[in-house]
């Protein structure tokens, strides 16, 4: 428990360094992006007249609109797959594994790959997914397919497979935390109150891990929405999501459109977080 | 044959190489208040969890109401359990919580609501129906947990140190409330505790456990007056335990040589131990007097050590040479006759010694 009350001068003083940093590193750049997205004219100049024409042209383009839907859809897909997988891993770690050392060992095995950068981990999937890749060779070796399947690399399937491996633990972490905070006796008490295992899960475990679920889902949502590296590496040039669009416009020197897409991406992400906060007030976790 | 609620038949439970419950048998007649009493780690909680089905027994059988349930999961056993910290569901209101068991039994909604309301009224917590556990006091939580456990009308209620987490001032009240509930409903309670005051004031039957086994089963009076083993005598407050060798036996008495003297002890039941055999016996501290008369056959010269008050009792710790050898209790209302450092002769009637027949583990 904090001994500093919420609105005391000391609390403001303590928050000041972080607030200054966040202002400089996040708030001001974000406002700059929003500003640039409203620039009219063609010159790269702060004197540009402000207009919503950039947005109007973006929304007038069916391909771009579909890209927003694709990106949100990809996020929802990952939230579903990694959500279930991540929860299952967390449940296994906390509830099924009884020995602390085994739990620690499995936890490390899951976490150590994440010591490398996200881009390298994305690229590492290419030898697996390619026409001559590990997956195809294995399938052919097992006689499950006679010719290599080219649906893995440069496809949504491949991107999804890579993203599942990248983001599942984002779900596991918060769920492990909330799950280990549930005393074993609560499940046992329910069991002694005539509840079979499935009912114990539905009525006790699931509701009590809801905060962890929501945090995990938000983390996956935000990461997939902003993921351009995996899409670029696995999808090649054939596929793009909103993040790649930002990069494409930026590399083409069109910072107005890059900003427009960045702003829309942020709006989508904020909307997602807002919905999540409606379900569970994550800020009150631990109170 | 009386109606038996619970039968444990030679149950054994191991954790790896650790023997938690060792070949334990126990019969509990219908409507009995049973207390499993013992030091921590003696296997009493594990026994309770085996009865609940939260632990699987490795061998033996458990019968509830004459039906073997050793292979049945907890939710199919005719039991309810109260946990040490009550294990109330933090996300449910009191009413929801209490109705949980009936919901699981797929009772119709109206029926659940009716019985929950009745239950809340019985335990005088109807005004708390809409509250969540975090906002309840210790006593209110305890009542909510009890109402929740009893609503399915189980044959046996298992209680794992159910008042251990309550304030001391609340304990006595709650203890007697629980006893009254048990009497009124006539169901069996199996109450695990390490607190002998609880066990002796509540239990119809007290089961003293040590090292995964039962040391003694009996009424509180049995266990207080006639401990079967040196362990039971030593575990129960107020006993002086002596170990020694039998030197003679006659007229239903044995003479036992101990490190501090020779004493006469009656052989009340069981066989007379052989001369030369190692035995132990005990004498209750309040049976020893510092003014022995002709009837006090067993006497001893001691030096008075510390004097302490235990409730209404003044307890003297008596020494010989450098070691404390026994304790003597007097009612505090009597004027103190001894002070620390005084020499005294103390004694007790031969009939007040209790020979232990259960030492060595054989039942």
Image (cartoon, rainbow, N blue to C red):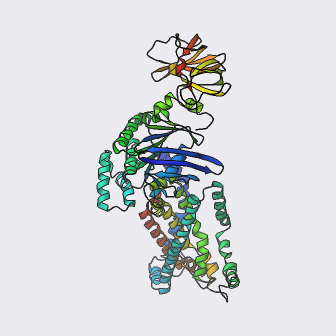
Taking depth in this image into account, of A190 and B222 the one nearest to the observer is B222
Kindly identify the residue that appears in the image at 61 percent across and 50 percent down: B14
Residue B261 position within the rendered picture, expressed as x and y whole percent measured from the top left: 64, 17
Residue B180 at least partly seen: yes
Judging depth in this view, the residue of B119 and A35 nearest the camera is B119
Front one among B232 and A179 = B232
* The C terminus of chain B, quarter of image: top right
Task: Tell me the quarter of the picture where residue A87 sits.
Answer: bottom right
Which residue is situated farthest in the bottom direction here?
A: A147
Residue B262 image-quadrant placement? top right
Q: Nearer the viewer, residue A39 or A115?
A: A115
Percent coordinates x, y for residue B62 in the rendering: 51, 51
> Where residue B287 appears, x then y in whole percent?
51, 19
Q: Where in the figure is residue A111, as x and y percent of width and height?
A: 64, 63
For residue A6, side relative to residue B18 (left or right):
left
Residue B315 seen in render: no
Q: How many marks?
A: 0
Seen at 53% across and 47% down, the residue is B47
Which quadrant: the N terminus of chain B? top left
Decide: is A217 above or below B295.
Answer: below
């Amino acid at each position: 428990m904090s001994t500093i009350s919420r609105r005391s001068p000391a609390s403001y003083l303590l928050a000041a360094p972080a607030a200054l940093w966040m202002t400089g590193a996040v708030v001001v750049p974000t406002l700059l992006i929003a500003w640039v997205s409203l620039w009219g004219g063609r010159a790269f100049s702060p004197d540009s007249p402000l207009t919503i024409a950039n947005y109007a042209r973006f929304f007038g383009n069916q391909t771009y609109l579909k890209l927003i839907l694709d990106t949100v859809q990809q996020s929802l897909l990952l939230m579903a797959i990694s959500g279930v997988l991540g929860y299952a891993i967390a449940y296994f770690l906390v509830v099924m594994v009884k020995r602390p050392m085994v739990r620690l060992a499995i936890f490390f095995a899951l976490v150590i790959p994440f010591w490398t950068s996200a881009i390298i981990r994305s690229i590492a999937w290419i030898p697996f997914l390619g026409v001559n890749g590990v997956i195809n060779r294995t399938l052919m070796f097992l006689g499950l397919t006679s010719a290599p399947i080219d649906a893995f690399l440069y496809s949504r399937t491949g991107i999804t497979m890579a993203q599942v491996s990248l983001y599942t633990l984002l779900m596991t972490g918060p769920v492990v935390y909330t799950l280990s905070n549930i005393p074993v006796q609560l499940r046992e008490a329910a069991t002694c109150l005539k509840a079979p295992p499935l009912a114990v899960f539905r009525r006790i475990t699931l509701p009590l891990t809801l905060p962890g679920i929501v945090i995990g889902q938000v983390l996956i949502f935000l990461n997939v929405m902003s993921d351009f590296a995996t899409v670029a590496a696995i999808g090649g040039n054939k596929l793009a999501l909103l993040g790649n669009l930002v990069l494409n416009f930026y590399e083409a020197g069109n910072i107005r459109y890059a900003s427009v897409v960045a702003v829309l991406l942020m709006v989508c992400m904020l909307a997602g977080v807002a919905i999540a906060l409606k379900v569970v007030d994550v800020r009150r976790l631990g109170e | 044959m009386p109606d038996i609620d619970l039968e444990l038949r030679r149950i054994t439970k191991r954790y790896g190489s650790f023997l938690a419950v060792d070949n334990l048998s126990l019969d509990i007649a219908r409507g009995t208040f049973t207390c499993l009493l013992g030091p921590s780690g003696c296997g009493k909680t594990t026994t309770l969890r085996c009865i609940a089905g939260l632990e699987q027994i490795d061998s033996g059988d458990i019968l509830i109401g004459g039906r073997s349930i050793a292979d049945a999961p907890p939710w199919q056993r005719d039991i309810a359990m109260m946990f040490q910290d009550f294990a109330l569901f933090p996300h449910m209101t009191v009413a929801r919580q209490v109705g949980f068991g009936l919901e699981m039994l797929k009772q119709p909604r109206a029926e659940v609501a009716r019985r929950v309301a009745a239950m809340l009224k019985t335990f005088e917590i109807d005004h708390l129906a809409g509250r969540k556990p975090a906002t309840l006091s210790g006593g209110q939580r305890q009542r909510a947990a009890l109402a929740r456990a009893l609503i399915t009308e189980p044959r046996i209620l298992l209680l794992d140190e159910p008042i251990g987490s309550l304030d001391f001032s609340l304990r006595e009240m709650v203890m007697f409330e629980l006893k009254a509930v048990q009497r009124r409903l006539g169901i069996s309670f199996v109450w695990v505790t390490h607190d002998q005051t609880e066990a002796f004031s509540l239990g119809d039957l007290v089961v003293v456990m040590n090292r995964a086994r039962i040391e003694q089963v009996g009424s509180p009076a049995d266990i207080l007056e006639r401990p079967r083993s040196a362990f039971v005598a030593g575990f129960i407050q107020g006993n002086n335990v002596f170990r020694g060798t039998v030197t003679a036996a006659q007229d239903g008495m044995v003479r036992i040589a101990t490190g501090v003297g020779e004493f006469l002890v009656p052989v009340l039941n069981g066989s007379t131990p052989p001369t030369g055999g190692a035995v132990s016996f005990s004498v209750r501290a309040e049976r020893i007097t510092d003014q022995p008369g002709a009837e006090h056959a067993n006497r001893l010269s001691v030096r008075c050590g510390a004097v302490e008050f235990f409730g209404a009792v003044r307890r003297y710790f008596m020494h010989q040479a450098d070691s404390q050898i026994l304790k003597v209790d007097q009612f505090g209302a009597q004027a103190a006759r001894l002070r620390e450092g005084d020499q005294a002769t103390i004694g007790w009637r031969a009939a007040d010694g209790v020979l232990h027949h259960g030492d060595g583990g054989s039942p």
